[in-house]
Image: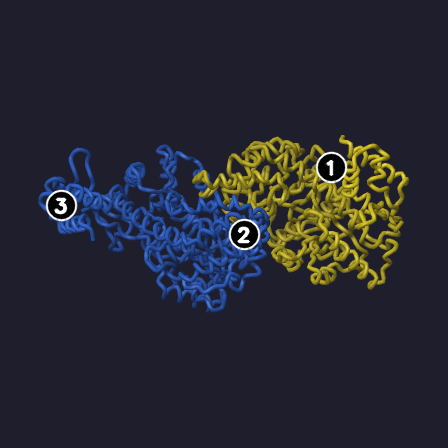
Chain colours: A blue, B yellow
Amino acid sequence: MTRYQRLAGLLAERIEQGLYQSGERLPSVRILSTEHGVSISTVQQAYHLLEERQLIAPQPRSGYFVTPRKAEPPVPALTRPAQRPVEITQWDAVLELLNARQEKDILQLGSGMPDLNQPTLKPLWKIMSRLGQQQDVRMLNYDNIYGVPELREQIARLAIDGGCHLTPDDIVITTGCHEALSVSIRAICQPGDIVAVESPTFHGTMQSLRGFGIKAIEIPTDSGTGISLEALELALEQWPIKAVVVVPNCNNPLGFIMPESRKRALLALAQRFDVAIVEDDVYGELAYEYPRPVTIKSFDDDGRVLLCSSFSKTVAPGLRVGWVVPGRYLDRVLHMKYIVTGSTATQTQMAAAEFVRQGHYPAHLRRMRQYYQRNLEIFTHWVRHFFPCGICVTRPQGGFLMWIELPEAFDAVKLNKALQEAKLQIAVGSLFSASGKYRNCLRLSYAQPFTERTGKALEILGAAVERAMERCGLSVHAGPSHEQEGRVSERE
Amino acid sequence: MTRYQRLAGLLAERIEQGLYQSGERLPSVRILSTEHGVSISTVQQAYHLLEERQLIAPQPRSGYFVTPRKAEPPVPALTRPAQRPVEITQWDAVLELLNARQEKDILQLGSGMPDLNQPTLKPLWKIMSRLGQQQDVRMLNYDNIYGVPELREQIARLAIDGGCHLTPDDIVITTGCHEALSVSIRAICQPGDIVAVESPTFHGTMQSLRGFGIKAIEIPTDSGTGISLEALELALEQWPIKAVVVVPNCNNPLGFIMPESRKRALLALAQRFDVAIVEDDVYGELAYEYPRPVTIKSFDDDGRVLLCSSFSKTVAPGLRVGWVVPGRYLDRVLHMKYIVTGSTATQTQMAAAEFVRQGHYPAHLRRMRQYYQRNLEIFTHWVRHFFPCGICVTRPQGGFLMWIELPEAFDAVKLNKALQEAKLQIAVGSLFSASGKYRNCLRLSYAQPFTERTGKALEILGAAVERAMERCGLSVHAGPSHEQEGRVSERE
């Protein structure tokens, strides 16, 4: 531990213990330097560290102050979706979200884009440039329907971290995780079938179901432990469900990692009712815990789990390189892949394979995990700071997405419209429900670097939420939504 | 015209007029040089040109001989598929064809791969390498669901050649023409619907129908003028057909260009019965006629034509850059694109856009048209030379695919198996029928440079066909299949 880290630790302890109180001005750099016998720059570094951790905040020309703290808002309660299969709606709202991607001047707090400006991505550019120079004609030609062999080798190697022992032939490359999910669902289901999903669930999955004429039954889901196995069991008993689609690791949008025991129990349930599991692991490598959590696929002994993933969240979505490990559904998955795209772009596959083979992937992943985790801390702090009471906030265990639940009467669709003027965009909760539930929720991304603009955006967003809540006649000083459950959040 | 071209023209004329007869030895280079007062090298160049045109052939150590010519085999008659909607089969056979792509030592005469070793593709490599150096972060990010704007601009520009006046917003980029077709079909049809197709028709389209649970009704098709409008009209009267899928320009596999009047008539028919037209134009730019033939889309005044294409046959299939002009079905097409792949790889789109923008595309296209047309001449010559009588051969008007029809009793599936030993592969005709018709047909590609190996392959193939026909008790000296139609082909 360096000198400035020791000093920062000491100061943090004092703040925790209330020696320096919330909102109080901290001693000047000069005074601390004398007091602790360290250089001015050491004190400055310590203050900088505490600032990063959001324990203190500078005020221009007056020094550092202890950040005022509110109580941690509670996490959302177990969701309570309609317990019957429904036709999926919400496409218009999804399209709106997608179209906003292109408007450069809009700050997109709702999108699932990773940060693409990290130095650990630099080797990828080099690789792409070199591939152009090498003029390997394979790059221009149709790819194998399974995908480029060297890429499948690398993915088999990476899968070990998630507990899977695969050969390259177990893997089918797809045009992003999107295609992986889409071909998996279509490989298992016919139009009119029913699929069980977590609630809330990724809108892309839901729209795939919709596109294929499949109904969704939304299963109550806990923001800490995932899909309710009890509710799922009931649904499996009651309805002819064909498959369960889950995002058990670093769930989108709730951020949980399903405990290993529950993963095993989910698989046992699937075996008992003989249904397939589509496991979306696209954020799994971004878990903040190390080693990364295992996949349900790692326990799969009868090939009923279709593991879907991609490099879109970990490396770059523009590559459109994903994959599926389809188990017993290999033939059907190949057919579905053939009919939707034929094959995946060859060059981007070769680039991804080379990025992993040359060893750049683990370093990049390590950096991204730390970066997103730190962003989460900053983000959580400012959400707590700017948002009114009466909200619930998830505690993501990986990835870069946060889910905020506002009181029932709140309308995030209206909020999003109101934010247009301020050039802000959030992802409205109703996108994540088959039937347009969760209009009172929003998904925020903390993937992008936290800048002054982000801070300002959260301030505007918080104020807008507060105004909207007041208009709805909702108290913004005590949490109304989960009061009855004893999970009140209050300002200190 | 240069000196050697003039000389070659003169000699060609003499051969045509029978002054030099079939199989006759031509004068030596020295004699011709003296006779015409030109240099030895001029005569050699002229002979080389005639050799390329297959009018003469060298024999080691004995000079040049007039190539023996057989009568042109007839073209296939109007096809006669079953006139009712059928479920599509043949996936296993398609998969076999796809898997063979990867076996480097197999000479693939059946595949739809273009030639990728032409010098006019060089700028594409440079562009790809430069894109890597530029490090434009857009390359790594999710693309707009419509596709990269600058690419759509270029495609709108190119579409003018096919008679379409589009804006970039009329175009949706897809992951190859495969996705364009797939999303178009799915945008129009529901499972259980019926779609009319040319017979034979591209197996990818057929498998897409199969994957979506759509039935196909195969319409009789003429190898010179395309789908029979009369038969189509009958089918439209009799069945609740939702859409017609056609490849009117440089048809795959028959090679015809539908006359403009028939294109208009097809559209009128579609309007009368209120069905959509999915127009696959993927080979349209490779027409040997100049300017290129117009698309049906160019006459479309009520948005019912979905024009599908890509750079896969003209530039490079590995890019996976295609597009659809979906007319009134835009919203549905966007939804379908979103659910199957979300977006297309950004980098390859940017590379394609730059290739066109910098002006390399017309030069490349010009070269490829000439190259394929010359290859067709060589190929036709050797097919005529090595194949027995009793076959029908198409006269492709563009692209690089030839369709050979053998007598009914012939089994191309067995032939393909027998060819494995010789490391040869053809595309079996039954792939191109929903119900496995055309087992007596084969599709050959003449995209790759004609080498000694190709010649040898055609010799083996011709001999195998001859043996198989003899085993079936079919005459190989007079065409049995279309005798009754007065279209006998005989050796001279």
Label 3 in the same subunit as label 2: yes
In the rendered image of this protein, does residue A136 appear above or below residue B418?
Answer: above
Picture coordinates of residue A142 (x, y %)? 59, 50
- The crowding category of the residue bearing disc 3, from other C-alpha atoms within 10 Å (few below 14, some 14 to 19, many at least 20), is some
Q: Which residue is label 1 attached to?
A: B265
In the visual, does A192 lie left or right of B484? left
Residue drawn at (11%, 48%) of the image: A19
Closer to viewer: mark 3 or mark 2: 3
Q: Residues within 10 Å of mark 2 (few under 14, many from 20)?
A: many
Going 69% across and 61% down the picture, which residue do you hit? B420
Tell me whether circle 2 and circle 1 mark residues in contact (CB < 8 Å): no
The alpha-carbon separation of the residues under discs 3 and 2 comes to 67 Å
Q: Residue A212 bears which disc, if any?
A: 2
Judging depth in this view, the residue of B349 and B77 nearest the camera is: B349
Q: Is residue B468 left or right of residue A420?
A: right
The image shows residue A159 at horizontal and vertical percentages of 44, 60
Pointer 2 chain: A
User: Is there any visible trace of residue B183 in the rendered image?
Assistant: no
Q: Residue at x 62, y 45 (%)?
A: B116
Q: Quarter holding the N terminus of chain B?
A: top right
Q: Where is residue A113 in the image (x, y as percent from the top left)?
A: 41, 45
Which element type, helix, strand or loop, lies under badge 2? loop
Return the chain for callout 1: B
Q: What residue type is labelled 3?
A: Val
Q: Residue A38 carries which label?
A: 3
- Above-or-below relation of B290 to A363: above
**Which SS class for mark 1?**
helix
Q: Earlier in the sequence, mark 3 or mark 2?
A: 3
| Image location of residue B84, percent across then percent down | 72, 53
Q: Is A43 left, or right, of B303 in this rendering?
A: left
Q: In which quarter of the image is residue B30?
A: top right
What chain is tagged by disc 3? A
